Every structure is written in structure tokens, then in C-alpha cells.
Image (cartoon, rainbow, N blue to C red):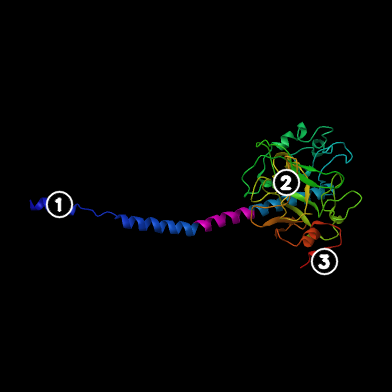
Amino acid sequence: MMQIRRKAAKDFRRGFTMLELFIAISIVGVLLAVLLPGVQYAREAARRIACKSNLREISLGLHQFETAQRSFPPSFYGKQDSPGLFRRGSLMGHLAVLPEILGANAVSSTAEKLKFGDAQWWTSPQSEFLRESHNSLFLCPSDGEKGSWVVATITPYYDTYSFHLMPANNDEQWTNYLGCSGSRTYSQSNLKGRGLFLPVSGSRARDILDGLSHTLFVGEVTGQVTDPVRKSGRRNSFSWLAGAQTVGEGLNYDRGKIPGQDFGWIQFRSLHGPMVHFSFVDGRVEAIHENVDQQLLEAMATIADNDMAVTTP
């Protein structure tokens, strides 16, 4: 009998009490609460770096285009006096720099692809293969949702605005980056406030009298008009063929929808916080706070308004 009792006592194993288990779970929870924000911050920092890298690559492609064509691409090609809301000839934008970014074989005969004739840009068979192309270079890593809007750029005379237009085909390309067309809307007879990207005729590097390091090049456009956090109108699908955008109303102005319409204006915005990444024509990329002084912002958006001193710290 004594041997049986000793064996039973020897085989006994003590387990966790409920209190010990609760303490262990609490410690794990505290560690996760401490570490998770750091992990999220590191991921967002990586996304910001990738976003800035995209802007640099697009800017480099624009410079390569300027070297080859002796001018930067216009915001769109077409006749300014064409009837209707959309000017014939469609939009230019990122299409021009694809050969420089992806290689000459990626987009052959760029000029031929732009000859849309009387066809609207969103139905043109010449642009279909580009609309359905996908390139992460034009996408901000922090903006993972495509939403449900398409964006066009309306550029009568020398005004340059972007707006989203209709439900989008989510299989088509979209962009988070547009060129800067100046400090405000302006007409053909009043070029004050002119930015780098204009309709029909492209600007040259020598036209930038305010200095390459003081002039905005390409900036972020992120979010959609139904987004309560970063309302700016999403630039989906065909918009990556689109042109440029002004900074005339600042970086924190909520455009919203156009009254009586199902579309709204786009503006430069970001999902990286209260700031917007811009590349300058000299190639560097800076984060500009959305509450930046408007006079300073407009000075950086123009190319020849003799306001270089305003942009110098």
C-alpha cells in the first residue's frame, strides 16, 4: 500500500491557477499595447518613404521627357475652342512620361496614342490599354482603397482643375499624384499665377524664372469626396492620364461636391497626416503642412511671378 501512495504523489503535477493565468494574459496585453503603435508607426514611416520615392521617380521621368522633347508635357492636348465641357484631344499627364519611366518599349509611339480625334478620352480605344494598365509607381501606399469615382481634368483656356466624374471601373488604373499648374485659375489673357503644366503647350525648364528649387512640381492627391477624414475627391481610373491641379484654395480647404452635381473638385491632400508631399523641380521632395501660409504656397506654385524671395527662408 505504501508503494502505491508514493507513486501517486510522485506523478502529481501542479497547474496554473486562474489568477496566474489572468496575470500572464494581462502582461501580454500590456506588451502588445506598447509595441503595436510602434509597429504601426514604422509601417507608416515606410509608406511615407515609398510615397516620396514615387514622387522622385515621376519627377525624374518628367525631366527625362523635357530633355528628349525640349519641354515638359502639357496637362492635355487638344483644341482650346472645342465645343462642350471636355476639350477635344483628351488629357496628357502621366501618359507622356511612361516611356521614360517604364522604357521606350512600354509605350510605343506616344504621339500616335494621343491622336484621339473627336473621340472622348474615356472611351477612346487608343487609351484603353493605358487605362487598364497597373503601375504601383502612381499609387500612394497609404491609400489602399480605390473608391468609386473617376477623375477628369477640365482645362478650358489655361484654367486647370481636376474633378471626379462617374462610377469607376475598379480594374482600371488610378493615380495619387498630379502636377502643379499654378497658384490659381487663370485665363489665356492673364498668365499671372501660371504654374509649370499648361494645356496644349508645354513649359520648358528655362521658363522657370523663380528657380527650380523654389517651384512645385508634382504633389499628392488622396481620398474621395465622401471620405469624412480627407475629403478631396478621388482621382481614380482614367485620371492617371489627367493633367494638373492648382493650389489656389490652399491645402486644407474642403471642396466637397459641386452644388447640384454628382462630382466634385479635387485638391492636393494626403493620408500621411496634416501635410502633403510635393516634389520640387530640382528633384527634392518635401512635406508641406496643410496650414502653410497661402502666400508662400502660391509663390512656390508659380514659375515666373518674380516671387522667389517669398519662398526663401
Q: Secondary structure under badge 1?
A: helix
Estimate how packed mark 2 is, as few (under 14), some (14 to 19) or many (20 or more) residues with alpha carbons within 10 Å.
some
Estimate the spatial distance between the alpha carbons at disc 3 and disc 2, rounded to whole Å. 33 Å
Q: Amino acid at mark 1?
A: Lys
Q: Contact (CB < 8 A) between labels 1 and 2?
A: no
Discs 1/2, front: 1
Q: Circle 3 is placed at which residue position?
A: 309
Discs 3/2, front: 3
Estimate the spatial distance between the alpha carbons at disc 1 and disc 2, rounded to whole Å. 77 Å
Q: Secondary structure under badge 3?
A: helix
- Residue at coordinates 35% horizontally, 56% vertically from top-left? 22
- Residue at coordinates 76% horizontally, 31% vertically from top-left? 125
Instruction: Locate residue 236, reporting x and y percent.
Output: 69, 41
For this rendering, which residue is in front, 98 or 149? 149
Q: Contact (CB < 8 A) between labels 1 and 3?
A: no
Discs 1/3, front: 3
Q: Amino acid at mark 2?
A: Ile
Q: Indicate whether residue 176 is drawn in magenta.
A: no
Label the magenta part by its dominant secondary structure: helix
- On residue 48, the disc is none
- Residue at coordinates 8% horizontally, 53% vertically from top-left? 2
Instruction: Locate residue 56, reporting x and y percent.
Output: 71, 53
Instruction: Locate residue 189, reporting x and y percent.
Output: 92, 50
Q: Contact (CB < 8 A) between labels 3 and 2?
A: no
Quarter containing the C terminus: bottom right
Q: 112 above or below 159?
A: above
- On residue 101, the disc is 2
Q: Circle 1 is placed at which residue position?
A: 7
The range drawn in magenta is 36-49
Estimate the spatial distance between the alpha carbons at disc 1 and disc 3, rounded to whole Å. 92 Å
Q: Quick one: which residue is furthest to the front in this view?
A: 260
